Image (cartoon, rainbow, N blue to C red):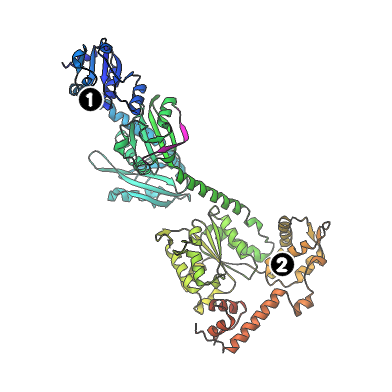
Amino acid sequence: MCKTLQDVIILKQLLIVGAGEEAVEFIKLFQRKKGFRIVGLLVKQPSAIVKYQAERLDTPLWKDVTAQSLDHVDFVLETSERLADYLEPTSCKAEIISGQSAHLMLAFASQEETEKTSTYNNQQFRSKTLEYLHEGVLCVNRQDEIIYINEAAEKLLGSKKHRLIGQPITHVLPDSRLPETIRKRERYVDEQLRLPSGIEIVYTCAPMENDQEEVTGAFTVMKKTIDIVALAEKLTDAREVKSMLEAIIDSSQEAISVVDENGIGLIVNPAYTRLTGYTSEQIVGKPAVTDIMEGESLHMQVLRTRRPATGARLRVGKHGKEMMVNAAPIIVDGKLRGSVGVLHDISELHELQDEVQRARKIIRSLENKYTLNDVISDSETMQVTLEQVKFAVNADAPCLLRGDAGVGKGMFAAIIHNESKRRHRPFMRVDCTVGDEESLEKQLFGSLRNNNVTGMIEKSDGGTLFLDDIDGMPIRVQEKLSDFMTTGKLQLTSGKSKQVDVRIIVSARHPLERAVFEKRFYEPFFERLKRITIYIPALVERMKDFEGLLSTIVHKQNQLLQCSVQSVSDASISVLKEKKWSHNVKELETTVAQAMTFLEKTERVIQPKHLQIPSLDQQSLAGTLQEQVENLEKQLIESALRANDFNKKATADQLGVSIRNLYYKMDKYDFDRSGMQDFS
């Protein structure tokens, strides 16, 4: 015999047979009504989830039943199982409500309540979920005017909300694609943009539509390229909130899951599906423990304690991947309405930690490198150079450093990098005179062969690449490098192309104009490099800096050699000033370091006897070892050129050097190459 809903409401004792969602809904329904008590939930082989549901709903779990145990039961409500599976129905005095009748009764009773609360609760859950997204949100109307901006976006844009509301988006983000999103009704994903403040962001924008599928505006979700931005703020307009929040949660790259106050799944986004392997259909409507293979559900912990839980490591998803999980309660009007969780792949976190460690190493190394304060600039020539360097710091364009060997071109390249906005990104150096053409090309651009070598250009992404002695670079490599500087795209070892942001600084010992004229230097490449040209004067041109340089060198060498030298005597300074410094400051530093090694432990001042410098007469007759070697090298090259009728290829073969190396040596010793044969 089937009873009506009114009959059931006045009952006092009720037993529910079977498990599943329908049984749970009956327990919830009758617990909200008065005049009855649920004596138990009868399930023959209860699973872990059924046990969990029964405990959560404070309902006794029956695994078996007898006619005597039903003496005080008024009604038996069948759901997924039947009472006949346990005993003969005729022996039961209680009225039995069949599964079909129970199903109709449940649908009838819960329909009105569901309709009243579902829309409100979904919007509240989605609104609260926004608070846990580490992204900035900005919305515009059809007139391209800003109608909403959250706190995270305020921080990114560096302006207050009341100043931005009503402003045309073209005034605030002139290069964004929001207007295009409205006109073309298209979504743009992971677009890159540099804000007026200099912050680089990645943003996604999409159109907003009303119930009639009319475009009412557009929104954008923004975050920093490296760091995650502040939590998104709750939106207010009820009709637009639903569509905006769904799009925002779905476009987030963070894996997000949301459950209600009973721990039943409400929302998962595509990033969650990609990470765990579970679809929305497999999670929504299921208990929070469904996706966990090992560990306690953080959702249930949050619902129990009403407090956030962070940093838990759980094995989640179909393949049991180890993940870092953070969760926080959703409180609406002072009431607990659910929990939101964010999952992170541990392997991705390890990669981020490695990246942070690399960044810290770079920062530590840069902190110990040169800055503008390290430049001794008492001389007028160095003051002019210093002003040019200050201009180059802010220009963020290719830069050409000219000067003789040893003047400190590498130091000034490091200064320009360390003082620029790229200071916390890599600073890489390549010597263009070392190795042959193939090895230099491999060093710069990487190689797909063997071990897939990553090139220095890719390693310098976001930072600065210093090419020392660019006049020694083969012209084919110059052409390839010029093409990269034009497009900014680099062919990776994986076979894909990548946009690389790197500043190029080069140094040259000899005038590149001559090399361009003689077709040994690629002219378009030179035109790009010469936009900012800085001349570094030789030591002989900045003698007013001499004593300041000496003091700096002594201080530096004290640290390196663990010495306690206090000064250089006046007599020693006179001797040093008279010397011909063919290798400039670098040679001076070497000479002072050698002198410090000859001091006794008790000596604190460098005297002439410590200096390994010949007299002026000896210098004019013999010169330093380096000068003698260079003179001999020059004589050998000149002799070989004459022996081969100035045929450069034959000369290079005889000397056992490459054509490129021979060109470099001829420029170094200022050979007049007019009338010489090339044959290269």
Residue type at numbered disc 2: Met
Name the disc covering residue 111, or none.
1
Q: Provide the secondary structure element on which disc 1 rests.
A: helix
Name the residue rendered at 52%, 48% in the picture.
Answer: 356
* Looking at the image, residue 501 lies above or below residue 201: below
Earlier sequence position, callout 2 versus callout 1: 1
Q: Which residues are magenta?
A: 307-318
Residue 16: x %, y % from top left: 26, 19
User: Which residue carries the number 2 mark?
Assistant: 543
Dominant secondary structure, magenta: strand
Report how many numbered discs are placed on residues in the image: 2
Q: Provide the secondary structure element on which disc 2 rests.
A: helix
* Looking at the image, residue 53 lies above or below residue 270: above
Name the disc covering residue 75, or none.
none
Disc 2: CA contacts within 10 A as few (<14), some (14-19) or many (>=20): some
Residue type at numbered disc 1: Gln
* Looking at the image, residue 377 lies above or below residue 134: below
653 or 562: which is nearer to us? Answer: 653
Residue 42: x %, y % from top left: 28, 20
Residue 596: x %, y % from top left: 77, 61
